[in-house]
Image: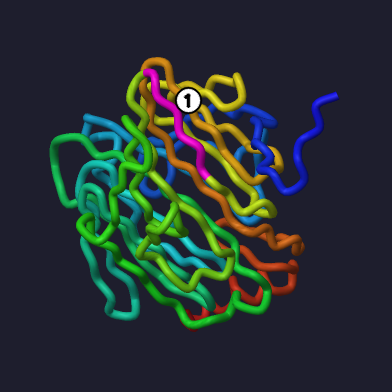
Amino acid sequence: MNARPEGSPTLRSVLRIVRGTATSDGAGVRLMRLIGTESLPELDPFLLLDQFGSDSAADYIAGFPEHPHRGFETVTYMLEGRMRHRDNQGNEGLLVSGSVQWMTAGRGIVHSEMPEQEAGRMSGFQLWVNLPAARKMTAPRYQDIAPEQIPSITPAPGVKVRVIAGQVAETSGPVQGIATAPLFLDIALNASTHFELQLPAGHTAFVAVFEGNLSIAATQLDAGELGVLGPGSTLKLESANGGRAIVAAAQPLGEPVARYGPFVMNTRAEIIQAIEDFNGGRF
């Protein structure tokens, strides 16, 4: 019997594979939904994960006109393209290739996200992360991170990691002060390489592959697939032909979830209040 030594790392495996579901959002932006579907409604504390990407302006040009949020956080990671953000508090910013915005909607915000290009490729991800009940009505805030502010490291030969939130070895990401203590990484592996990453043992985690393919404990994930990870403290990624993925982990909240469109609270009464506050112009 080969027992694992006490205190040694346990490798995470893939519990299930989810393929993206084609849908549209905003004013008709075409995208692939990986979390927030019938097959994977949520993954505590992750509420939604959309991947968008097209060379055709018709698929994205209408953008996301003004819409409200309350009770959670949105993470927009731009791989390619330009997106202009505006809100009803007078804030404005421009997301460019390689940038990220971590928006804490808190008690309420009304904003728009509109493409600032009429041609060329636009691609990226939007992730929704729940807020704990105690912080759902906090003041809204933004962390707009320019590409040059995101550290890019080579922790192993043939491996490149952009550290957006959390820590890899001695490198910390620029996104700070998030309730769920998230890890959010963009990891690329060259062909015939591997990389071991330490993950907080109690965190919910997933890997969303968007280029090539990656293997985790002999389970292969291809582009367009998300792997829900099981428990453990170490993630071992391998790639025979090269691949790139978003790796995310965060502390689960274990709280009731009541959601209605752009509002995510803990009870139906709080959802009704959110609708009344929005309709009454109190966001």
As rendered, which of 274 and 1 lies closer to the eye?
A: 1
Residue 194 against residue 247 in the figure, above or below: above
As rendered, which of 277 and 259 lies closer to the eye?
A: 259
| Mark 1 residue element | strand
Q: Position of residue 40 (x, y in %)?
A: 65, 38
**With 208 as the anchor, is 205 left or right in this view?**
right
Secondary structure, magenta segment, majority class: strand
**Residue visible at 75% across and 64% down in the picture:** 255
Residue 278 visible:
no
Q: Residues within 10 Å of mark 1 (few under 14, many from 20)?
A: many
Residue 189 visible:
yes
**Residue visible at 20% across and 52% down in the picture:** 96
**With 215 as the anchor, is 204 left or right in this view?**
right
Q: Amino acid at mark 1?
A: Glu
**With 158 as the anchor, is 203 left or right in this view?**
right
Q: Which residue is mark 1?
A: 238
**Residue visible at 35% across and 53% down in the picture:** 64
Which region is colored magenta? 192-197
**With 222 as the anchor, is 154 left or right in this view?**
left
Residue 33 against residue 116 in the figure, above or below: above
As rendered, which of 71 and 88 lies closer to the eye?
A: 71
Instruction: Examine the structure image and report whether residue 272 is included in the region drawn in magenta.
Output: no
Q: Position of residue 238 (x, y in %)?
A: 48, 25
